[in-house]
Amino acid sequence: MLDALQAQPADALLALIKLHAADPRDDKIDLGVGVYRTGDGATPVFKAIKGAEQRLVDEQDSKSYLGPEGDGGFVSGLMPYIFGENPERGGRIAGMQTPGGTGAVRLALALAQKAGARRVHLGTPSWPNHAQIVSDLGLETVPFDHALPDGTANLDAVLRVIREGGEGELVLLHGCCHNPTGIDYTDEQWRAIADALADSAVLPVLDIAYQGLGHGMEEDAAGIRTVIDAVPEALVAYSCDKNFGLYRDRVGAFYVLAKEAGDLDAIMSNANMLARATWSMPPDHGGAAVRIVVEDKDLTRDWLGELDDMRERMRGVRERLAAADGDIPGLNLSALADQNGLFAVLPLSSDQIAALRKDHGIYMAGSGRINVAGLHRGNIDKFIAALATVAG
Ligand code: LMR
């Protein structure tokens, strides 16, 4: 039976980790997979997480099962950060822990499919795993253009999809720090999207994987809160990979906004069943550490301080790249200063991307996506010079 399987290409983003590791050059630069790096190129464990882990070691007295919902304190502890005041919206929002943001996206789409969804409108380019999850579930991806050539979001395209879409259709929106473009909707654009969704049968799936890395925890959630306050129903996928630095611990959460509080039991029983059939229960460790951080004032302060530092460093990198705009015409580097989060897409050809890798040891995704956190004082001049050589 199994010899009938066709070989699948390796995940292009994850393959970059190995390619970069195998390159012997000392001055190689990794702008591939989306992990935050400090000015020294490291991805350390957050101090707040270390503190929480120490408490777990000292105080945790059992590793017995928690159930498909995971750690309830983790799920509810994140809610004020995501949803703001009245985080349960009068009992209309409930959630559960998932293995990473990927688990949350998968669960959201599988639940919607169980409720009758067939098509997912997806602004492209997007995180490649979005379309892969959609197709693996047997749903249809319907792409629309996320961005305009000037480096801003294409509001008309998303509004058209929402206004023309109907029953059985979803629209998957990035809450902040769009992956891969870094191009987010403005507050006014979110308002228009929310108004359009309020008049449409299209169900929003809000994926928020980088909260705090754009403009701040509150600012980065403003868009999804505008939608949540306008629509009868929504699904939310949340990741703690980047904003708690918990990548390999796989910490995520799935939330649902129901039309009526009374609908939630049935909805969550389906989500529980799907989780049980897929991964049974989420891994506990990282979620427990996040719960301890958000329940403790001192650890919360440390965590938010660390996030501020990360955001400021990335702003500095973006500004330095934008300042090189005049040296390398055609790349529209100036737009990077107004974009958010870890990523930006440079309009490079595959030959130029290959030349950056071969001749300069610079690794980026084949889409031209760079992880701006891979740049720092020690390598940014080299990167700009290399860009000028291949694209100038
Ligand atoms: C990325 O886009 O690089 C990250 O979200 C990591 C991943 O899982 O792809």
Image (cartoon, rainbow, N blue to C red):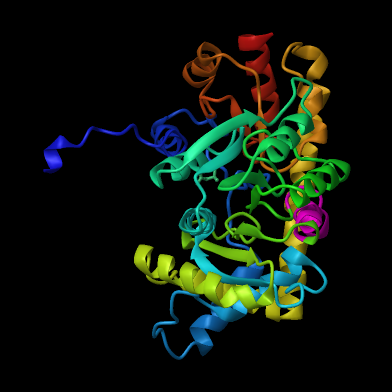
Q: Residue at x 65, y 39 (%)?
A: 165
Q: Nearer the viewer, residue 363 or 109?
A: 109
Q: Residue at x 66, y 51 (%)?
A: 204
Question: Is 28 on the left or on the right of 12, as rendered?
Answer: right
Q: Is residue 62 magenta?
A: no
Instruction: Indicate whether 254 appears above or below 316.
Output: below
Quadrant for residue 303, please give it.
bottom right
Quadrant containing the N terminus is: top left
Q: Is residue 226 magenta?
A: yes
Q: Nearer the viewer, residue 198 or 211?
A: 198
Range of magenta residues: 213-228
x and y percentages locating residue 45 in the rendered image:
58, 61
Evaluate whether residue 361 shows in this view. Answer: yes
Evaluate whether residue 40 shows in this view. Answer: no
Judged from this view, the residue extending furthest toward the right is 188
Instruction: Indicate whether 174 appears above or below 67.
Output: above
x and y percentages locating residue 239 in the rendered image:
59, 58
x and y percentages locating residue 265 in the rendered image:
56, 77
Question: Is 217 on the left or on the right of 137, as rendered?
Answer: right
